[in-house]
Amino acid sequence: MHPYGLLLAALAPLYSLATRSLDDRTRAGLMVEISLGTTSRGDGMTGDKLEKLLEQRKTLNARIQQEINRENRRKRKDDTRRKILVGAAVLDDAEKHPKHKEQLYKLLGRFLVRPNDRELFGLDTEAGNQKTEPKTPENDVTP
């Protein structure tokens, strides 16, 4: 095993304690610096070795960023799925309970401001003219 590997293994518990308050991105950057030995050691490292290590760090940083991006995409997908499921549950409940439907459309009337969003729910497309019920065949009185 490489001597720095032994040192890194010995310091790992201390590292985790010392970096608990740091965010993941900062912690990952510190770990890369420690594992690559880029801290000053005064051992007369040649330029070629240093360049190779810097290139390895650059590669690892790119891989770390890819992993961070992948995790962020997964979180956004999960958030979108939660919103869809909550919306489906609320709309289902509104269809079964007229009082809930009325409350939902009042909320939507206050919340939705874009005309195309308001139109999806049968609300007046002008935010100032808030309706409490959607246009349905029963209550739509068009000439």
Image (cartoon, rainbow, N blue to C red):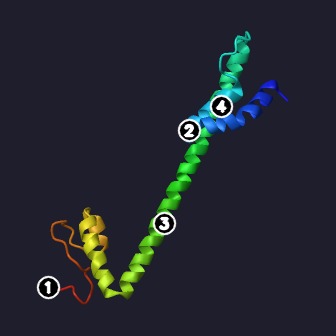
Q: Which residue is mark 1?
A: 143
Q: Which residue is mark 2?
A: 25
Q: Report crowding for label 4: few under 14, some 14 to 19, many 20 or more residues within 10 A (C-alpha).
A: some
The residue sitting at 56% across, 38% down in the picture is 25
Q: Is residue 59 visible?
A: no
Task: Name, please, the residue furthest toward the bottom.
Answer: 138
Q: Position of residue 54 (x, y in %)?
A: 66, 22
The circle drawn on residue 82 is 3
Q: Report crowding for label 2: few under 14, some 14 to 19, many 20 or more residues within 10 A (C-alpha).
A: few
Asked whether the residues under the numbered discs 4 and 3 touch, taking CB atoms below 8 Å apart as contact, a structural biologist would say no
For badge 3, the amino acid type reads Arg
Looking at the image, is mark 1 or mark 4 nearer the viewer?
4
The disc, 1 or 4, on the residue closer to the chain's N-terminal end is: 4
Looking at the image, is mark 3 or mark 1 nearer the viewer?
3
The disc, 1 or 2, on the residue closer to the chain's N-terminal end is: 2
Q: Which residue is mark 4?
A: 32
Q: Position of residue 55 (x, y in %)?
A: 66, 25
Q: What element does badge 3 sit on? A: helix
The residue sitting at 60% across, 32% down in the picture is 29
For badge 4, the amino acid type reads Val
Q: Is residue 38 above or below residue 100?
A: above
Q: Is residue 117 above or below residue 56?
A: below
The residue sitting at 50% across, 55% down in the picture is 76
Looking at the image, is mark 4 or mark 3 nearer the viewer?
4
